[in-house]
Amino acid sequence: MKRNAKVSTAVIRRLPRYYRHLSELQEAGVVRISSSALGKSMGLTASQIRQDLFCFGGFGQQGYGYKVDSLKEEIGEILGISRGHTLVVLGTGNLGRAIIQNFRFSSNGFQLLAAFDINPGVVGTRIAGVPVYHADELESFIAAHRVDVGLLTVPIAAAQRMGDQLVQAGVKGIWNFTNYEISCARKDVVVESVHFSDSLLALSYMISQRELPDQQEENQ
């Protein structure tokens, strides 16, 4: 389905949730599902589901619902999972190594080609089968291979510099785990920053809000 150019960021952010949930339903043997049932299982309203999916065309049939495998395939196509995106990791410290070893890149439509570091004890080795090169070889590697995304887990002090190198080398996107807001003048390069502290503080807020009524009762 052709994407509406005016799709909001909020809708786009929900698409991976739909894809993940539909994958779970598919594994559980669910063949079709109504918008009401899908919304209930995801904590959304049926109206929200229909509005989100309508942004990308017509899905499902009135009175029948959605075919789980077909809807998953359509959303996967919208997300670009079948386009064969490629990725490299910059930084193989604790976080970088954990991501390489545990994240299922292939399930999300990405092929992890290589990792880069400056630690002589790591360069020349393999992590979960992924070759580790010296960071000085980054530009020549990207010149020789099509690399769509660079994943950054380098120290904060090196974040902007390595981000700039990725942009200059021609990547289309940066998945930034450095806890540093990378600036990018190129509008054709997308930077997606992951801040673990943001999620934790949001959780802290929600916990705090639930504790307030209990505290008020205790003070009465």
Image (tube, rainbow, N blue to C red):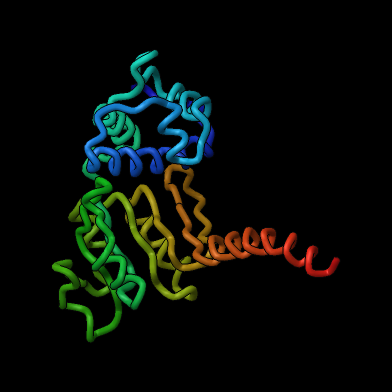
- Residue at the extreme right: 220
- Residue at the extreme left: 129
**x then y, percent, for residue 80:** 30, 37
Any part of residue 214 in sight: yes
Q: Nearer the viewer, residue 102 or 182?
A: 102
- Residue 119 versus residue 159 in the image, above or below: below
**x then y, percent, for residue 113:** 20, 59
- Residue 193 versus residue 108 in the image, above or below: below
Q: Residue at x 49, y 75 (%)?
A: 157
- Residue 74 versus residue 176 in the image, above or below: above
**x then y, percent, for residue 217:** 79, 64
**x then y, percent, for residue 13:** 47, 42
Q: Residue at x 45, y 53 (%)?
A: 192
Q: Quadrant of the C terminus?
A: bottom right
Q: Quadrant of the N terminus?
A: top left
Q: Quadrant of residue 198?
A: bottom right
Any part of residue 135 in sight: no
86 vs 168, left or right, is: left
Q: How many marks?
A: 0
Q: Nearer the viewer, residue 22 or 57?
A: 22
Q: Nearer the viewer, residue 169 or 114?
A: 114
164 vs 33, left or right, is: right
Q: Quadrant of residue 41?
A: top left
183 vs 56, left or right, is: right
Q: Nearer the viewer, residue 118 or 39?
A: 39
Q: Residue at x 38, y 64 (%)?
A: 152
Q: Residue at x 33, y 77 (%)?
A: 93
